[in-house]
Amino acid sequence: MPLSDELADEARRQFTICNACRYCEGYCPVFVALERSPVWSNDRIEHLAHLCHDCRGCYYACMYAPPHAFAVNIPQLFQEVRLLRYEGAPGGIRRSGGAAHPPERPTGTETGRSPVEVAVRSGRRAARRAIGTTALTYLVVGALVTVVAGAVRGLGAVWQVRHGATSPYAIIPDGALVAVSLAIALFAVVAVALRARRAWRATATVALGARRREILRAALADAAALRQLHGGGPGCHAERDVVGRGRKRLHGFVSVGFSLCLASTISAAVEQDVAGVLPPYPLASPPVVLGLVGGVLLAAGCIGLSYTKLRADRAPASSAMLVRDYGLLASLGFIALSGLGTFAARTSAGYGVALLIHLAAVLSLFALAPFSKLTHAVYRTIALVVENAEVAAEQAGTLGPPPAEAEPIRTTLSTS
Amino acid sequence: MRRITPVRGAIGGEGREAGTSLSQLSARPWDVIVIGGGNAALVAALSAADKGANVLLLERAPEVFRGGNTRHTRNVRCVHDGTDEHVTGSYLFDELWQDLCAIGDGPSNEKLATITVRESELLPRWMSAHGVHWQPALRGTLQLTRTNRFFLGGGKALVNTYYRTAATRAVTIAYDATVEDLLVTGERCTGVLVTQSGTSAELRTGAVVCASGGFEANVPWLREYWGAAAENYIVRGARYNDGLVLSALYRHGAAKAGQERGFHAIAVDARSPRYDGGIATRLDTIPFSIVVNRDARRFDDEGEDLWPKRYATWGHKIALQADQIAYSIWDAKVDHLFLPPLYPPLVGDSVSSLALHLGIDPVALQTTTAAYNASISDGGRFDTSGLDDCSTRGLTPPKSHWALKIDQPPFYGVPLRPGITFTYLGVAVDESARVLRTDDSRFENIFAAGEIMSGNILSSGYLAGFGLTIGGVWGRIAGEEATRAAL
């Protein structure tokens, strides 16, 4: 769904206030980027929304935050904008220029609701749809792996009691598993790549040029370190008075845990196809160690982040995004726990069922990935590349002049 | 992550949860009561707590609007030798002193002004020690300055930090707490009379620090000195600064400092909200424009000096014009040379159509621009980074710099009003921040800090970031001296 003109206009209204104030420049590059070209197309708004890492420092620092009449709430606005992108945006985005906007919050649209309220309400409908789609996907994928397993090995094999660790291929044959997994993974990769290309084309402002390598390295370093969550030093907020590195660490648990689980799968493929060692693997083997450590980290991160979100301040948050956050954390957490459970059950009669559940969860995650919050990693990285490229161009003096003919003069920042 | 438990109405220090009701706050005497909730009040409360006092801070505003005018500040001007990363070079005592002497009528009380400048050097370290984060020099467009030090995120973030720090110290906070009067016997204050959500109570204390700001949001009071003109002023900061505590101090015999009509006011967009519009409503169009009054006549030199040195004079200039309104007018040539205004400018294809949009006499405005344009000879060097040689000739008043003809459509204009930041009229204090009395004696245990006593330092004009300096320096002195008086 493209960024609605109402929401884009609301973004331009809030940006106009930010651009006249500029107190938040120290928190993250969003505000500096916002000032860099003060005509905000819908694409530019999206870029800024993805560049935001949701540290919320600006919200708590903002003297114009609700209940002030100017009602500036950048984190919530950006969550609404990002969500529209995650859920899929067929077709182009309507462009409109940076029309001037009065700073007071519009009291209502034709339906009597403010643009953010409209976004929140349509967000709720979309959230219900997303929950439905997710449930359906799990059912379909679950049925698919069960049918494949049953058709080849017979459902009896799933329940068979064995002695010693079991190979997954006793439940579902190698070839069938690879075929189903590869088909879904290929779909996910191609769909994400297409969407990433679209996002890059829509938001890139300068060519990477000769400094391509340096720019990409800086962007990836920013992404890996989640530098924008540092909030200019103090860290990110869960509440006004809860500031620190907690959310960042928990996010690190999730991303590192997820990566280790992926690495475990890849190492199993290497053991099998390169070394010729078939599962089950011993405790001290790469697939088992990576999977166990990754699973524990992933589960801990998901539980920790969910707990943080439950306690967090809702004021700078979009409830629709919160639904997706919990959804993704539940999916990842379930994958982690079902994976650990499958490992624990590998000598018992429950192994077959545990394996099928785990496989269904993993394959469903990948099937849904292109339209889920999981893509935030891709969009944020693209935004960081664009930002690093703009900074590089600015340093080199090659950043084209913004629509204005000259750089605005930076008046000395005078207060009180 | 550090978690501080917020309590509605009041926050208990040292992890204790104080009750929200006034009766609980009045159950025991306090060592120090601080009246106010902005920078000066918080610094006083923290300083008193550091010295061992049990402190109650009474904030008039509800919690969401706490912090007084500090909410809208962003930097502090301090003496320093330039050896840290948050400023770009040294700024020594003599230079700040000279800057202070160069504005308005200069320092009101040289002894107190000297203390302010001298003690400012210790302030940044104190602020850091109480949790304040400074703005780093970032890649991109962010610029640090030599004279002023920026705290991360501006004044509301600063205030949040201080409240967060206060919650870990022996400071109890009450919001929505209006101090109606001080209980004074002779030269001694025994307590304060507070109203909170309809109920009143007398709270006893060993000493009191008045850091409750000026009276700029009290229109009837302003009318006493400005007449009906006061109705047309926009208050850039807190709507709660009605001077209740200041008038109570006067009733009890406190001596005045500062001038009745003294205030810091800048030009703001006339369409700004009546209160609390803050920094975003400021306009930087003036040096690139001509400014006319209600009758479409120019009345001052828009290019007198660099804008940062002159921005603070325009609120007063407009306050003296008929109906307290003025209009800044420019053309397409210079549009985009300044920070874009918050409210979109009015636009006209001709000067007279712009005048109609602005609601002023088109013929008069055309006459004014024609005379202005005729006084400019082509070929001057236009340079916005310094004092250039584009000036008018034979025009009264002149435009000394950046004078370009207004001849390229479309033409733009915005209406301007005086936007008051704070008033200078306050109470006189001595070097221990004790409030002086009209009979030349002094109160034993009443202290003042911040805008309520800024008239001791300056009585007109303004130096960016110096309000925070006054609040910080005198908040520390008042907090420490109040503790000494109480314990």
Image (cartoon, coloured by chain):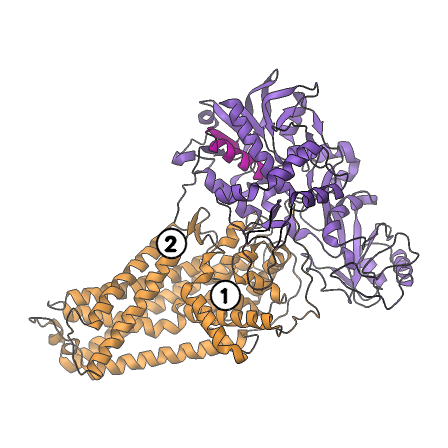
Chain colours: A orange, B purple
Q: Does residue A164 appear left or right of residue A177 in this picture?
A: left
Can you tell which mark lies on residue A51?
1
Residue occupying the far right of the picture? B394
Q: Chain of mark 2?
A: A
Residue occupying the far left of the picture? A163
Residue tagged by mark 2?
A: A246
Q: CA distance from mark 2 to mark 1?
A: 20 Å
Dot 2 amino acid type: Gly
Q: Chain of mark 1?
A: A
Residue occupying the far top of the picture? B186
Q: Please name whichever residue, B134 or B337, is drawn nearer the observer in this view of the structure.
A: B134
Labels 2 and 1: the sequence-earlier one = 1
Among the 4 quarters of the image, the one containing residue A223: bottom left
Does the magenta portion include B39?
yes
Residue B122 visible? The answer is: yes
Task: Find out whether the residues at labels 2 and 1 contact each other: C-beta distance under 8 Å.
Answer: no
Does the magenta portion include A305?
no
Residue A289 sits above or below residue B208 on the image: below
Q: Does residue A248 appear left or right of residue B353 in this picture?
A: left
Q: Position of residue A253 (x, y in %)?
A: 32, 61
Q: Position of residue B125 (x, y in %)?
A: 53, 43
Among the 4 quarters of the image, the one containing residue A176: bottom left
Write down the region rendered in magenta.
B35-59
Q: Position of residue B230 (x, y in %)?
A: 75, 38
Helix, strand or loop at mark 1: helix
Q: Please name whichever residue, A187 or B404, is drawn nearer the observer in this view of the structure.
A: B404
Q: Position of residue B298 (x, y in %)?
A: 86, 52
Dot 1 amino acid type: Leu
Q: Residue at x 45, y 76 (%)?
A: A196
Residue A313 visible? The answer is: no
